[in-house]
Every structure is written in structure tokens, then in C-alpha cells.
Amino acid sequence: MGNRLSKIYTRTGDNGATGLSDGSRVAKDHARITAIGDVDELNSVIGIILTQSPGDDIRRILTSVQHHLFNLGGELSLPGYQLIKSEHVTYLENQLDNLNKRLAPLKDFILPGGTLTAAFTHQARSVCRRAERSVVALHNKEAVSESVLQYLNRLSDFLFVLARHLNQQCGQPDILWQSDIET
């Protein structure tokens, strides 16, 4: 890979277009670029979670997720190419099941929050849902692999369970939603 990114600015996007990995150019507000940008933002929020020292097991999982998301963005940048596979979805399902079995069953909706790390994880979950919506919007116009759609859907579920797990680790109970709270 060497000095592949030796020059950061190219001026080729100054007219509102950007390049895909296949060499084609699209508008910066194209559905594909929106989806790539939302996945990139999600990866950045996960990076913030990792600054909070979530523990070695969670660090390992989230670092894998970051690599998967980078591949997912690469797949979106190269139409017709597939980097996210069903085994990536299965990996997330296994991690989710492992964390969820340690949690009390949910009987009510919960509010995002608790510890700072859990709050960032809830933020990552909501960014993941936006990324998923962007990819679905793209999928409605152009082909996107089913594994990408499944991966983002499972990842948002995983992040929800992870936020609960992180709060539990710190002795912070879930913040239950109350529909009848007085203002």
C-alpha cells in the first residue's frame, strides 16, 4: 500500500462531483455518496466509543466492526463488488446473543443514556439506523448486496444491546421510558 495517499487534496471534487472506486464520477449528493458518508460517520462514532476504554472484549468486537464498516463503505464505492458476506452478519448475531443473554429481559422502552460510553453507543446506534436508511434508499435505485442491508440492521441491534451491557457493567440501570411523566 505504501504512499498511496501521499496527496490529500486533488481539486477534482471542487465542482460538486466525486469519484467512485471504479473510476466513475457522481454528484456528492448522490444516494451512493450519502450512504458512504453515513457509514463513515458511524465508524467515527464507534471510534469515540473506543476512546472510552470499553474493555478488551468489547474493544476487539468494535475494532472488527470498524474494519467491516470500512469494507462496507468500500463495497458501496465499487458497485457490483461484494466485501460484506453472510459470515459478517453471523459474527454480529453471535456477539449480540452473547451480550444479550447476560441482560435482564426488556419489558419497557428505554431512553438513550446512562454512562458516557453507553450514551455514545446509543448515538452510534441512531447513526447506524440512518446509515441503514441511506443504504435502503440506494438499494431502491441501484443494486446493493443483501448482506450489507442485513449487516447494518444487525449492527444497530448489537449497538442497542451493547449500550445496555455497558451500563450494566458500571452498575447503571436502564433508564425506562415513562409515557405519563409530568413536565
Image (spheres, rainbow, N blue to C red):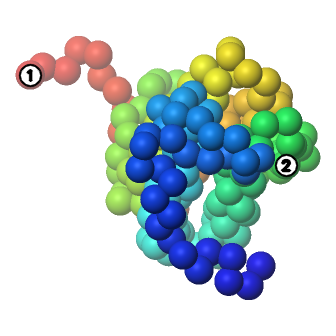
Q: Amino acid at mark 2?
A: Leu
Residue 165 in sight in this render: no
* Looking at the image, residue 122 lies above or below residue 66: above
Q: Residues within 10 Å of mark 2 (few under 14, many from 20)?
A: some
Secondary element at tag 2:
loop
Q: Quadrant of the C terminus?
A: top left
Q: Of the numbered discs in the image, which one, if any, rests on residue 41?
A: none
Image marks 2 and 1: residues in contact by CB distance under 8 Å: no
Q: Nearer the viewer, residue 48 or 28?
A: 28
* Left or right relative to 62: residue 23: right
Secondary element at tag 1:
loop
Residue 159 image point, x, y percent: 58, 46
Q: Would you identify the image quadrant in which residue 131 lies?
A: top right
Q: Nearer the viewer, residue 66 or 13?
A: 13
Separation of disc 2 and disc 1 at Cα? 49 Å
* Looking at the image, residue 33 lies above or below residue 133: below
Residue pushed farthest bottom? Answer: 2
Residue 22 in sight in this render: yes
Residue 81 image point, x, y percent: 86, 42
Residue on which the image places disc 1: 183
| Residue positioned 68% across, 15% down in the render | 140
Residue pushed farthest left? Answer: 183
Of label 2 and label 1, which has the lower sequence position? 2
Residue 37 image point, x, y percent: 52, 44
* Looking at the image, residue 57 lies above or below residue 174: below
* Left or right relative to 56: residue 81: right
Q: Nearer the viewer, residue 73 or 15?
A: 15
Residue 143 image point, x, y percent: 79, 24
Q: Of the numbered discs in the image, which one, if any, rests on residue 83?
A: 2
